Amino acid sequence: MTITSHGEELILDKERALYLPQHQLLAISDLHIGKSAHFRKAGVQVPSTIAQNDLQRLSLLIDKYNPKMLLVNGDMFHHGLNTDIDEFYEWRKRYQELNFILVKGNHDRLSKADYNKMSIEIHEPSFCLGPFCFIHDAPQCTEEELYPISGHIHPGVTIVGKAKQRLKFPCFYFGNDYAVLPAFSAFTGLYNIYPKNSERIFAITPKNVVQV
Amino acid sequence: MDQTKTKGYKKIKQWLKANGRKPFKFQEDAWQYYLNGYSGLVNAPTGFGKTFSLFLAVAIEALNSSEANGKKAKDRLQLIWITPLRSLAKDIARAMRETLLELELDWHVGVRNGDTSQAEKVQQKKSMPEILLITPESLHLLLAQKGSSTLFRNLKCIVADEWHELLGSKRGVLVELAISRIKGLQKLEKNQFLRVWGISATIGNIEEALDVLAPNPETKRIIVKADLEKKILIKSILPDDIETLPWAGHLGLKLAYKLLPIIEKSKTTLIFINTRGQSEMWYQHLLNIEPELAGRIAIHHGSIDFELRNWIEDALHTGQLKAVIATSSLDLGVDFKPVDTVVQVGSPKGVARFLQRAGRSGHSPHEISKIYFLPTHALELVEAAAIKEAAKTNNIESREPFIMIFDTLIQYLVTLAIGDGFDDKVIYEEIKNTHAFKLILPEEWSWVMQFITSGGDSLSAYNEFKKVTKDEDGLWKVKSRQLAMRHRLHIGTIVSDAMLKVKFISGGYIGMIEEFFVTRLKAGDNFRLAGRVLEFIQVKDMTVVVRVSKQKNAISPSWNGGRLPLSSNLGSVLRKKYNEALNKTHQDEELDAVYPLFLLQEKRSHVPRNDELLIELINNKEGFHLFAYPFEGRLVHEVLAALVAYRLSKLLPISFSIAMNDYGFELLSETEIPMDESIAYEIFSPKNLTEDITLSINSTEMARRKFRDIACISGLVFQGYPGKYVANKHLQSSAGLFFNVFSDYDKHNLLLRQAYDEVFYQQLEEPRLAAALERIQNGTIIITNPKSFTPFSFPIKVDSLRENMSSEELEQRIARMKAESEKIK
């Protein structure tokens, strides 16, 4: 689905990604690489395939849009180094040309050397582009002129209909003051958001992105 | 060996005689069988000394033996007494200690459960008492300790008290597993004298109850049944006018004034209320309508602080209290002598539970138990009539034991691994001999072992997984201390939301409330707990700090206790009573009281006869409703409703929300529901049943809901522990997320299968559903179109759980919902 915000064209992809054609930038948020391995290390059974699947989805997106830049809007890595991150490193090597930008989030605590090794460009606290300011947690944005695009909360929306019908989806939120991207990783929960009247919400169904 | 010739027996008889008592026959029988090496089950009404039938058996044997005392500290443990409730242990321990003192048997009685202090537990570890009173969870915690495998060397007997209560739950499986381990440990020592006994109230499947407890048919087993009858007097509290009672809801507070004279003329009254939230309301209301009761009534439920509950129980013993409002926390065996009257508010949902509660009054032999039933809505009067009849004909429910509960097995294996470790070949043999896992397949066992050692099957790699590993001595163990600590905190199968302790700012604990409730409170808000109105100040160090409020009224927290479904026995009696109500072919005053309501039902729609199924189609602002009334109990209705919805949704794209209660169910849709006689017979057909049920379960949330408990019990989701909440942000996740993840990436996961199996086998009882559908096919289906809600449909509409079922495209649904409501929440 293509929308316009602050004079720019934005593509909302059902794979929980945002594409800015003018800048050839693909933006995702809350990738949480290493989360499943972190759980496994602590004795909780989470399949490794879940992380591999996240990277596969990302590969498909890169093939589809052929971006110059891939921006991760925070929480790229869940905790410390582990095998999930080794796998990411191998995956990363396939995209030498791609400029990889990380806007730091609360979970991103690897050392500078580690980010360097994986050729990830660090921006803290935000990365600004055109009318937008990419930042992990919107309320912390100090760029008053720009429209913050954030992540962090893993937004979800519940649609309530007649006859007690109720549906819940991950979503994109484009509010009056800021926007929130959905969490990219499949191993994340949802936090319900309640939009005001004039604000736009785009629910992500298995097949489509739908404005609600 | 004839016990009457033994030293111990003579001493016991002497002691009883000195106290002016003599044993009942069933007690002497139990002693004799015990001495002869039998395991078994004692079945007797409350108040006739079930405890003594087994405790004295062990004492007689000890008195007969010359080496009863002076053993090495490690070898002292003789008797493990498993109780389902903490409150029971204290009273039983007191009775045992007094008896031992008078018998001059130098034994110690220890209590070990969630309320036991750390210091006492350490002391017990140094030197076990001869008798240990313990909950199933604490027994597993004991197995989780290093060195625990040497504790049971001299154990003579394990008693499962109130076994009927544990049997039909996963806690019963905990007991089965612990027994299998202790037996195994004794076998290693070449000891063969362990006997396993249960104490049970009357249930429909008492033979099976013995089978579960002592599954080896080659051991000597016996059911000792007391030939005694407990007289019970049941009386309903009727409204003067049926309009006084609401058509639905929970409260019935309008009838509360009728309780006052009952409380007044009784010595002590126990008032049972089904949920903790409502019990708080009733406490407040009784005080409001009769201020004279202040200081003479108390409130008792599981979320009230241990000290306070202790005080109430002591006051009950000494007769200081006129009435106590209680939930199931006071259901079981505690013997409060002054209690001579019991009141049940709202439907008890089962005959066994009702009789159990009745038995709390007139506890001594030959006294009459007196119970009053206070309905909280009009149709509950019919339930009262049904319960009276079922009690009279002794139509008592079975408690179905759980089988193939992989979540509990996984928890148990990790428990052993953090204790002294285990040999998988040995344990496999042990669990194969339990009732719960006798059908386990070798491949299922190896899946379970893989799950705890390498994470899961090789098809879906679980890199870096660390939990149970093989030690140098060849035993499977947990090495990480952190992991062991986390596991210990969540041993058990009762899953509740995270609880926080509530404390006065000036000091002193009041009880516990759910974290979810606290998150909605702002400083200065008031809520009720333990019968007091409290003002919320703040949450500090995982404790809710409050002060006494000046307000008189406040909200009650709603603890998410499970709702009780109506038992199938009661369901069929209920159907019969519905028939009789309109015909006036009965003797029940309750049915007379509710007669006007049935007239109204007949006028607006129809009152179904025994061979009829009533379907009501009602169309209003909310949408198109379909109500059906099979009277099969809520659990079966949940599945049946999903089945009917699924079959209707095959006819055309349509979305339903589904609701149900014990009488019937509702399908609600935004678009008209296709319905005529031929469709009705079609959708209630027993044809293709298994296949259609499987498909309908898959398309609702039933399995997902079952998975909530499974994820906690198996250790996937860590919930913390009452009062010991441990926040661990990096490991936070939810059962729902795991359900999705396994569905997508690890379809062969046995825990996932267990969720579906629990719906299919435990909830649904396929034969029962098939029989219900046969009955409907051979009877008449009546379809009516009432203009407004009927007395039957109203309770389902306002008071029920909901499900969803749809055959529409998601995008279409969203578009339509958006267009028609323009309301996003």
Image (spheres, rainbow, N blue to C red):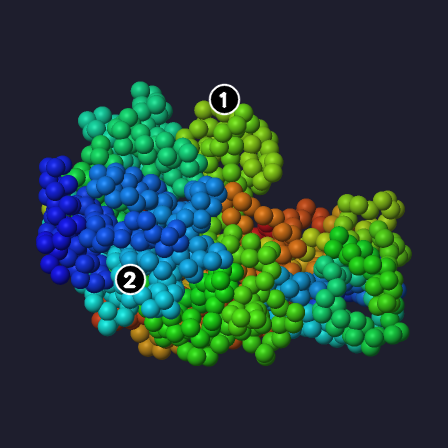
The answer for which chain carries disc 1 is B
Checking the image for residue B550, the label placed there is 1
Q: CA distance from mark 2 to mark 1?
A: 59 Å
Other-residue count near label 2 (Cα within 10 Å), few / some / many at <14 / 14–19 / ≥20 = many
Residue B604 x, y percent position in the rendering: 28, 50
Q: Kindly identify the amino acid type of the residue bearing the numbered disc 1.
A: Lys
Rendering quarter of residue B731:
bottom right
Name the secondary structure under disc 1: loop
Kind of residue at disc 2: Leu
Residue A107 on image: x %, y %: 74, 55
Q: In the rendered image, which quarter contains the N terminus of chain B?
A: bottom left
Q: Which mark is residue B480?
A: none
On what subunit does the disc labeled 2 rest? B
Residue B598 seen in the figure: no
Please say if B553 is above or below B92.
above
Q: Which mark is drawn over residue B194?
A: 2
Residue at image position (48%, 56%) is B145
Mark 2, mark 1: which one is toward the viewer? 2
Q: Nearer the viewer, residue B536 or B5?
A: B5
Residue B686 position by quadrant: bottom left
Q: Left or right of B164: which side holds A176? A: right
